[in-house]
Image: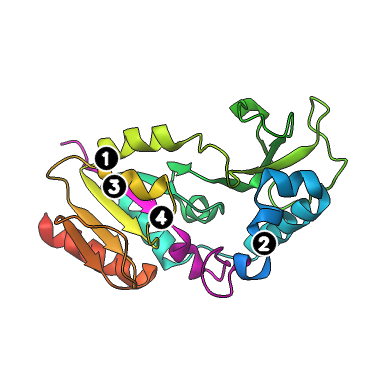
Amino acid sequence: MAKKRLVVLTGAGISAESGFSTFRDNNGYWDKYDPEDVASIRGWERDRQYVLDFYNGVREQLRDASPNRGHMLIASLEKDYDVDVITQNVDNLHERAGSTRVLHLHGEVTKVRPEKGAYDRDFSVSEVFDIGYERVDVGDLAPNGTQLRPHIVWFGEAVPNIEKAMDIVMKADIFLIVGTSLSVYPAAGLYRYVRDGVPIYVIDPKDVNLRDKRVVHIREKAGVGMEKFIKILENSR
């Protein structure tokens, strides 16, 4: 018998339990930095080194973080389910926990790509380089001779993987949302692509912006919530 397809959409709440700073929550990055300065084309054009230093710091923090119980339990579900993870997070904690199919909507902080023209959104996957936790500075150039920029989707930029994410969600037999309040679009609208009759589970201690009668809301943080979710799956077999 083929495994059921479980699609998991994750947000900052799952990485917060690893001690990795979120961007929007209290004491997150946006409390310390203006996103216009470090997450926009205009900020990049004003001061490239300032932007690069910000992401150098994020990579440094990520290097010292470890996957938590929530990440590990999601990865463990691959034993019994066909699992796709769609994440709004720019960290690599899902991969480090063992998840094998992870789609990043907003980019990956451990990767860079050529700047080309500042407004050039048409980049090839072959132009994306994994630098791990290394620094990048002004003057560090791609093979095509242009400045390397963070492989991050900044405010005002298109989300290249959103159509791929929609296709994945439409094939789900079970849809799980972990650690996101569904306030950031277009990711927040992905649940609308869940087929009729497919159950939707949400793990988050806070209210979420989702009105659907199918939703089962587990009001816990990611680790404890994942344990409860797995018990629900076991009892439904």
Q: On residue 191, which mark appears? A: 3
Label 2 and label 3: CA atoms lie apart by: 30 Å
Q: Do the residues labelled 1 and 2 touch (CB within 8 Å)?
A: no
Residue on which disc 4 sits: 10
Residue on which disc 1 sits: 193
Label 4 and label 3: CA atoms lie apart by: 12 Å
User: Which residue is at a point 67% across and 59% down the rendered structure image?
Assistant: 58
Q: Which residue lies furthest to the right in this view?
A: 139
Tell which tag, 4 or 3, sits nearer the viewer: 3
Q: Are marks 4 and 1 in contact (CB under 8 Å)?
A: no
Q: What stretch is highlighted in magenta?
A: 1-29
Q: For the residue marked with disc 1, what is the amino acid?
A: Tyr
Residue nearest the observer in this picture, 62 or 75: 62
Q: Are marks 1 and 3 in contact (CB under 8 Å)?
A: yes
Label 1 and label 2: CA atoms lie apart by: 33 Å
Secondary element at image label 4: strand
User: Which residue is at a point 40% across and 64% down the rendered structure image?
Assistant: 70
Label 1 and label 3: CA atoms lie apart by: 5 Å
Residue on which disc 2 sits: 34
Q: Where 235 falls versus 132 (above or below)?
A: below
